[in-house]
Amino acid sequence: MNTGRQLVCLLLLCCSSELHAESPDPLQELAAPCLACHSLEPDGATHVGPSLAGIAGRALAADRNYTYSEAFTERASEGLVWNSDTLDQFLKHPQAMVPGTAMSYRGVVDAAERSLLVDWLLSEDMVTNAAELADANYSRDPAVQRVLETSPDMEYGEYLAGECLTCHQAGDRSGRVPPIHGLTADYFIYALLEYQNGSRSNRAMQNMSGPLGIEEMAALSAVFARRMPE
């Protein structure tokens, strides 16, 4: 197997609760991982995850435009809905509430920060203030900027992506491996860099991402940013 393809076969996700660049608004840091993976469009458009628009009072796994993991579907069969209690429980420890979920989100330990995030998710103006919050994107990180400034070789990216898709498939076909279709390029790069510097502890991803250079990251991030979830 080609070494370049081996380096990226486990690529991934998902949502870190920290940014290298400081933000004057704590909600920006808390919401940034959400905005990297989820759409806030009320028409139900999906990205890596389902749309968050109208989540208040909505049943778990109820977005018909999104293919949920088996773990989420099973939990939803219990009749749970998204409210302040269930959102707080999920954001504190996703794997504890939905064992086996493919969502690779660390959770928010601090109760006050979780409360701030829950209040935003349940607020009526969540969609209208999303653009302002999105200003706290990962492209502010100088290391991410250097990759984004590199012109991506899309053909090379498609070649490398083929191996990634053996593990990171869309919907419930990926099992516990998070999907990466539609992931924003800046977050995609940011995640790889965190594996490289040891901020993320997954040993397999640290080994795979370590040798990746700017050209490989630029190509892969561009390819997956254009791939929409099935």
Image (cartoon, rainbow, N blue to C red):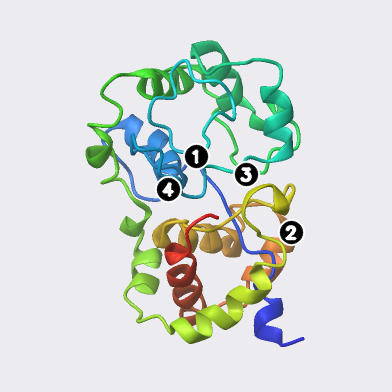
Cα distance, mark 3 to mark 1?
A: 14 Å
Say what amino acid the circle numbered 4 marks: Ala
Query: What percent of the width, then of the height, locates residue 198?
Result: 62, 57
**Looking at the image, do the residues carrying marks 4 and 2 touch, with CB atoms under 8 Å apart?**
no
Say what amino acid the circle numbered 1 marks: Pro
Cα distance, mark 1 to mark 4?
A: 12 Å
- Badge 4 local density, few (<14 within 10 Å), some, or many (20+)? many
Nearest-to-viewer mark from 3 and 1: 1
SS at mark 4 in the image? helix
Mark 4 — residue?
Answer: 36
Asked which quadrant contains residue 5, the reply is: bottom right
Cα distance, mark 3 to mark 4?
A: 13 Å
Cα distance, mark 4 to mark 2?
A: 23 Å
Kindly identify the residue that appears in the image at 60 percent across and 60 percent down: 195
- N-terminal-most mark, 3 or 2: 3
Kindly identify the residue that appears in the image at 31 percent across and 75 percent down: 149
* Outermost front residue: 64
- N-terminal-most mark, 2 or 1: 1
Q: Along the horizontal axis of the image, is 17 left or right of 90?
A: left
Mark 2 — residue?
Answer: 203
**Looking at the image, do the residues carrying marks 3 and 2 touch, with CB atoms under 8 Å apart?**
no
Up-down relation of residue 68 to residue 157 (above or below): above
Mark 3 — residue?
Answer: 104
Query: What percent of the width, then of the height, locates residue 22?
Result: 33, 44
Nearest-to-viewer mark from 1 and 4: 1
- N-terminal-most mark, 4 or 2: 4
Mark 1 — residue?
Answer: 50
Kindly identify the residue that appears in the image at 55 percent across and 55 percent down: 230
Query: What percent of the width, then of the height, locates residue 220?
Result: 51, 73
Say what amino acid the circle numbered 3 marks: Ser
Kindly identify the residue that appears in the image at 62 percent across and 69 percent down: 209
Q: Nearer the viewer, residue 199 or 157?
A: 157
